[in-house]
Amino acid sequence: MNRGRFIAFEGAEGVGKTTQIRLLASSLEEAGVPSVVTREPGGTSIGEGIRDLVLRSAGPVPPETELLLILAARAAFVREVVAPSLAAGKWVLSDRFDLSTFAYQGHGRGIDLGRIERLNAYAAGGVAPDLYVVLDLAADEGMARQMRAGKSPDRFESEGAAFHRAVRTGYLELAESLDRAVLVPADGSPEAVGERIRREIVARFPETLRGGAV
C-alpha cells in the first residue's frame, strides 16, 4: 500500500483553493492514487457546526473565542478524518489547515503566534501536512474575484482591506519559513495554476506518484 500524504491548500480569500483541490484530486484519481477531499474547519459533524458558527455568527466574536473554536474543530478533524485516511494509505487534500490559523488569527487578529503554536500543537496531536500549497494573489485581486463570483461574504471576507493585506503578508512569511511549504502564484487560468501545483507535487513525491503520473 502506498503511504498516505497530507496536502493542505492555504491562502487568503479568492485564491482558488477549492478549484485547485478538485483538479489535483482528479489527477490523483487518474494516477490510481486514492484521495479524500475535505476542508477545515469542517470535515466532521462537529467541525461543520463550528465552521458555521465562526463564519456566520451575527454577533461579535472575540479573537480568542474564534481561535479556540477553530482549534476545537481541528482536534476532531485530525482524529476523525486525517489520521484514519493516512493510515488507510489515502491522500488527504484539505482546504486549509493550521497555516490559516497563524495567518488569520495571528497576523490578522493580532494573537501572539507563540500562544497559537502551543495551542495548535495540542489540537493537532502531532499531525502535520507533508506539504502546504500556499496560493498567493494580491489581496485586492482576491477580494475582487470573490465579488465577481457573486458570493455572499462571510465574517472574514467582510473584513477591511488592511485585515486581508495582513493575512496575505502572514502567509508569505509563513511560506518562506517552512521547508514543507511551497508558494504558488494564483494568477492566470485555473489550468495554468493547476499545472504549477502538479509540478511541485511530482517534484516532492515522485516515488508515490509513479514517476510523475500526475
Image (cartoon, helix red, strand yellow):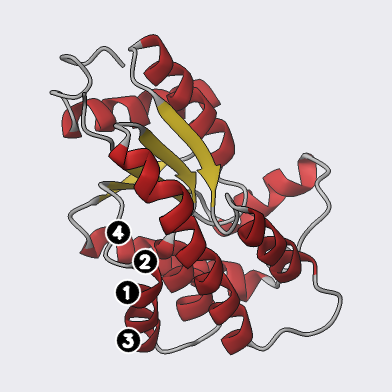
Cα distance between the residues tagged 3 and 4: 18 Å
Report the residue at 79% width, 66% height from top.
Answer: 56
Tag 4, which secondary structure? loop
Tell me the residue that label 2 is attached to: 124
Q: Quadrant of the C terminus?
A: top left
Report the residue at 41% width, 64% height from top.
Answer: 98
For badge 1, the amino acid type reads Ala
The circle drawn on residue 114 is 3
Discs 2, 1 touching: Cβ within 8 Å: yes
Callout 2 crowding tier (Cα within 10 Å): few <14, some 14–19, many ≥20: many
Cα distance between the residues tagged 4 and 2: 5 Å
Tag 3, which secondary structure? helix
Cα distance between the residues tagged 2 and 1: 5 Å
Q: Quadrant of the N terminus?
A: top left
For badge 3, the amino acid type reads Gly
Cα distance between the residues tagged 1 and 3: 11 Å
Report the residue at 62% width, 79% height from top.
Answer: 66
Query: Residue 34's x, y, as percent?
Result: 38, 23
Callout 4 crowding tier (Cα within 10 Å): few <14, some 14–19, many ≥20: some
Give the camera-side residue of 105 and 41.
41
Query: Residue 11's x, y, as percent?
Result: 48, 53
- In the image, residue 32 sits, relative to residue 46, either above or below, namely above
Tell me the residue that label 1 is attached to: 121
Precedes in sequence: disc 3 or disc 2: 3
For badge 4, the amino acid type reads Val
Give the camera-side residue of 87 and 59.
87
Q: Nearer the viewer, mark 3 or mark 2?
A: 2
Tag 1, which secondary structure? helix
For badge 2, the amino acid type reads Ala
- In the image, residue 210 sits, relative to residue 74, either above or below, namely above
Asked if residue 123 lies left or right of residue 67, the reply is: left
The circle drawn on residue 127 is 4
